[in-house]
Image (cartoon, rainbow, N blue to C red):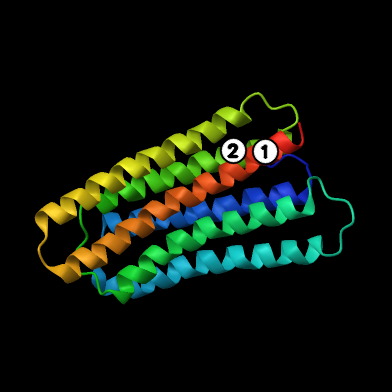
Amino acid sequence: MIKKKQNPYFNDFIDMVSFSCQAAEHLQAVLKNYNPETLSDQRMAMHNIEHAEDELKHNMMQRLSKEFVTPIDREDIILIANQLDNVTDKIDDILIRMYMYNIKEIRPETLAFSDVILRCCQSLQKTVEEFPNFHKSTTLIQNIIGVNTMEEEGDSIYISAVRKLYEEESDPITVAVWSELFDRLEDCCDACEDVADAMETIVMKNS
């Protein structure tokens, strides 16, 4: 997609959320064809996505430190950048934890989680792409609501997954490990919602 000519900070946001979508796609691919023998390499591939976004954010912050005029308040640029970075960090953390805990088999709920995380990121991408037009946009608020809806779907999966875990498993280590993994999967959706909510607040501030 050819980006419209607009302020570089808005383009940076779009690039950052693209990294989040790449991370979500990679997570889904790993979980769909889960192989603990290749998890180390897959984890490093995920880390490369996360690192590339960190570099982008670092460059943006360097530019921001020298700018006097910005399209929105400086602290709002920092907030959105940090929260977008957090989305990818949360997704990256899933494979880190699975590697640390030496997960041999995944529970089926993880596939449902990976699907909603990807759709949540894709919904956030639409929101970020529309954000530069926030003064006159007729669709931005609906896009924000779309992210919130995806986050609620993640909540529902989380509740069902944890309930099923405690119904089916008696081994305390398995329960502890998967409770944390489900927490962190749900956090990915929460992180997307945090970005959307921050954008909604900025729209209200500048109305």
Q: Quadrant of residue 127?
A: top right
Q: Which label was assigned to residue 73?
A: none
Which x, y percent locates residue 203? 70, 36
**Secondary structure category for the residue under label 1:** helix
Question: Which of the two residues, 38 or 185, is positioned nearer the viewer here?
Answer: 185
Name which residue lies at 25% across and 70% down: 36
The type of residue carrying mark 1 is: Phe
Question: Which of the two residues, 173 or 10, is positioned nearer the viewer here?
Answer: 173
**Secondary structure category for the residue under label 2:** helix
Which x, y percent locates residue 5? 78, 41
Q: Which residue is mark 2?
A: 127
**Which quadrant of the rendered structure holds the N terminus?**
top right
Q: How far is the residue under mark 1 from the one under mark 2?
A: 6 Å
Q: Which residue is mark 1?
A: 131
Q: Furthest-top residue in view? A: 138
Q: Is residue 1 visible?
A: no
Question: Which of the two residues, 110 or 36, is positioned nearer the viewer here?
Answer: 110
Name which residue lies at 42% across and 42% down: 151
> Are the residues at dot 1 and dot 2 in contact (C-beta closer than 8 Å)?
yes
Name which residue lies at 44% across and 34% down: 149
The reply, left or right, for residue 199 in relation to residue 90 is: right
Q: Is residue 56 visible?
A: yes
Compared to 198, does 143 lie above or below? Answer: above
Compared to 130, does 25 lie above or below? Answer: below
Which x, y percent locates residue 57? 67, 63
The type of residue carrying mark 2 is: Thr
